[in-house]
Every structure is written in structure tokens, then in C-alpha cells.
Amino acid sequence: MYASAHIPPKPEFWHIQSGWTKYYYSPDGSSYSEHVETPYHDGKPEDMLTFDVETMPNYHPYPVIACAASPSAWYAWISPWLLGESSDPQHFIPLGDPSVPKIIVGHNVSCDRARVSHEYNVQNNANRFIDTMSLHIAVSGFSSPQRPVWKKYQKEKILEEEQRAEAVEAIVGYMASVKEREQSETDVTQQQELHEVYHDLENSLLQLQTHDANGSNPEAAEAGHEAARRWEDITAANSLRDVAKLHCNITVDKTLRNDFLSAKPEYIRENLVDFLDYCAIDVQTTFQVYSVTLPAFVSSCPHPASFAGMLTMGSPFLTVDENWEEYLKKAESVYHEMEENVEAKLKSLAEEARDMMNDGEERWKYDPWLSQLDWTPKAAGKSRGVLPPQEVCLL
């Protein structure tokens, strides 16, 4: 299975040319590169790829750079538009003959798939996409109601780690000061006291560092009690950065991602080597996440239908024509009409319930739904600094 495969080391250099460039190593360890039309190896299309695409949303939705890695080679793709060779940004990424079965792995891979040229071909498409984000959600994801609790816990954890780092820094500085005083002290008794202080500080530092290594519950970690860990520690949000930290303990720097959102094409072009490195690191990280999450998914969902269903759901497409925009307008109109009808019906039911409450006959007691509600009037309380009239007078 692909999870047991490997990818070669990331290239140490990049050739700046439009289209695909292949980077590979010979058996003697020397590296080579060549321009290729699509990812090919030994005369046939690559059938296993880890893939990542970068775009510049402020300009257009089309790809500007992409990186891919197979067990045999690395590939980098650069848009002719980014290099100034074309004024048309509409360039899609070719991945080889679509009739040749291929497994393409990516994080939130549907976004990358939308930039692949053959995915717009209705016929003979044997590409199958595996999404590491979906694998993570299946084995370690959390629901929307859990998100605020998880985010709050993560903020508290970051604050705790910052405070612990400050404490470690302070103790290290104090230890250096005590050691210096001990070495310069001539009184034997004072030397012994300083030595004991230094020893106590050393123990405190060790405890802090052990706590930092084992997380918020070091006793449980040392004892191997997985069940004693908080649920917030065994799940993560869906971004590649969070998923990589959870499953692989990899810290991903996404600083350069902001440049794709705000920088001009000239800036990206001038620093293209750095951005290709950034994209390639995302590919490396995605592969490592995949190597962990796929076995976990197969273990949690062992039936072949689960894996086959995931592959099928990762390759759908919706055929549209010139009537698509009209369909969207009609659908939006129907949605608003139904929403207004629901609101009108709810308002009518509320007014009817109010009338039943105020008619003096208490008809609501005989209604199968309204009779289950608590109709006890609630006393208005203080809210947001608003005081009752009598308290305002006293003030």
C-alpha cells in the first residue's frame, strides 16, 4: 500500500521554467532535472503522487505553482502567466494520461483537483484522489459544537507553554548567577548553601522540562494511560498545520502562505525559489500525514466499501452549461421565498399561541404541544448595566 512507500529527498535547487520540471536521483546519488510534459517515469505516467497547488486568489482562481512527489522523483510546475510568458492566467495542470489509474494524495485535495486539466474531461478518467484532511476527520476529527471548547483549550495551552518557557529562562539565568556566586564564595558554609540552592533549581528545571515534554498530564503519559488524556489533546482542527502537529509532531510554518494572498506576481516571481520550497515542504508534510492517517483510517473503517466509497466521493463532478447562472438565480430565489414562508408561519403560530394565553379561557392547556411549555411569567432581571427605574432614582 502507498502508505508504506517513500518519497526521495526534496530537491536542493529549482529550475525556473514554465510547465513541469522533473527532479530525480541516479543510483550513484547524483541529481538530475529535465523538462517534462507531465509526471512520467520509465516511459509511463506516474501512478502515485503526493500533490499540492498554490494560487493567488486576489488575481484569479487558477494555479500559479504546484509540486508533486512520487516514490521515484519530484516534480515542480510553474504557470506561464506567473513567469510573464502569457497574459492569460487560465492554465491548468496536466497529470498525464487520465485513462491510466493514478492515486493522488493531497490535503483538502478537492481544491487541488479543481486545478488539474484532465478533471474537466468527462471520459476515461481513472484518477482517484485521497484527502488527508478527510482521513484525519474520520479518525481524529471533532464536531462543530466542540470547536469553541477546543480553541479555548488550545489558547490556554499556548499561554501555559509561554509561561513555562519564561519560567525556564528565569531559572536558567538564576542558576548561572548562583553558580557564579558559589565559585567566588570563600566561606565553606555559604558555598554549601549555594550548592543546595543550585541543586533545588536544577530539580525545578527538570520538572518543568519533563512537564513540557509530556504535556498537561505527565503522570498519565509516563504510565501510558491513553484514556487519561484530555480529548482536546487527541484531536485537531483540519488545517495541514494542525493535522501535522497532531499526527506527526511536525511544526509547519505557513508564513509564506500570506504572500500568495497579498503579494503581487512580480514579488512571487522574484522569490520563486522560496515559494517552491514552501510548496514542496507542504508536499513532504502531506505525505507524512498520509503515512500515519491511512493506516489509522483502515483500522477504524476496515471494510473495503469504506475505502472505495472515499475514493468515489473524491472524484465526482457536476456538468454545467450556459444555464448554470440562471439555475443559481432561481435556486436563490426559491430559497428566500421558502425562508420568508417559514418566518411567516412561525410568526402566525406565535401570535396564535399568544392569543390562546390571553383569552382568559386557558385554551393552551388543551393543546398537545403548548401544554408542555412553561408559561410562568419571568421577572425581568438586570442586563448589561440597565437598572430598574427605582434604582436609577436612588442613584
Image (cartoon, grey):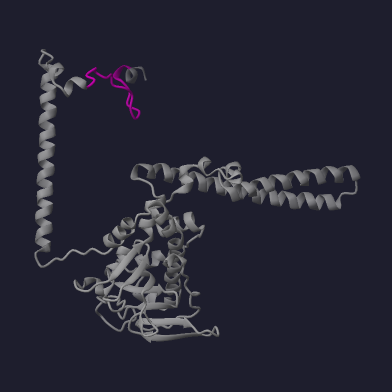
Q: Say which quarter of the image contains residue 303.
A: bottom left
Q: Nearer the viewer, residue 45 or 301?
A: 301
**Is the residue 267 above or below the residue 323 in the image?**
below
Quadrant for the N terminus, please.
bottom left
Residue extent of the magenta highlight: 373-390
Residue 384 falls within the magenta-colored stretch: yes
Left or right: residue 191 versus residue 242 is right
* Residue 158: % across, % down: 51, 48
> Could you say which is closer to the camera, residue 133 or residue 395?
133
In magenta stretch: residue 306? no
Residue 134 location, quadrant: bottom left
The C terminus lies in quadrant: top left
Q: Residue at x 24, y 17 (%)?
A: 376
Residue lying farthest to the top in this orientation: 361
> For residue 223, what is the image quadrant?
top right
Give the residue drawn at x 75%, y 53%.
176
Q: Residue at x 33, y 84 (%)?
A: 37
Does residue 2 lie above or below 388 as drawn?
below
Q: Main secondary structure of the magenta part?
A: loop
Work out which residue is located at the far front of the displayed protein and give it: 303
Q: Position of residue 368 (x, y in %)?
A: 15, 22
Could you tell me residue 222's position as x and y percent? Answer: 61, 45
Residue 318 in the image: state x and y as whole percent. 18, 63
Closer to the camera in the image, 137 or 347: 137
Q: Is residue 353 visible?
A: yes
At 44% from the left and 49% from the top, the residue drawn is 235
Q: Is residue 213 above or below residue 106?
A: above
Q: Is residue 254 visible?
A: no
- In the picture, measured across the screen, residue 180 lies left or right of residue 302, that is right
Q: Nearer the viewer, residue 282 or 140?
A: 140
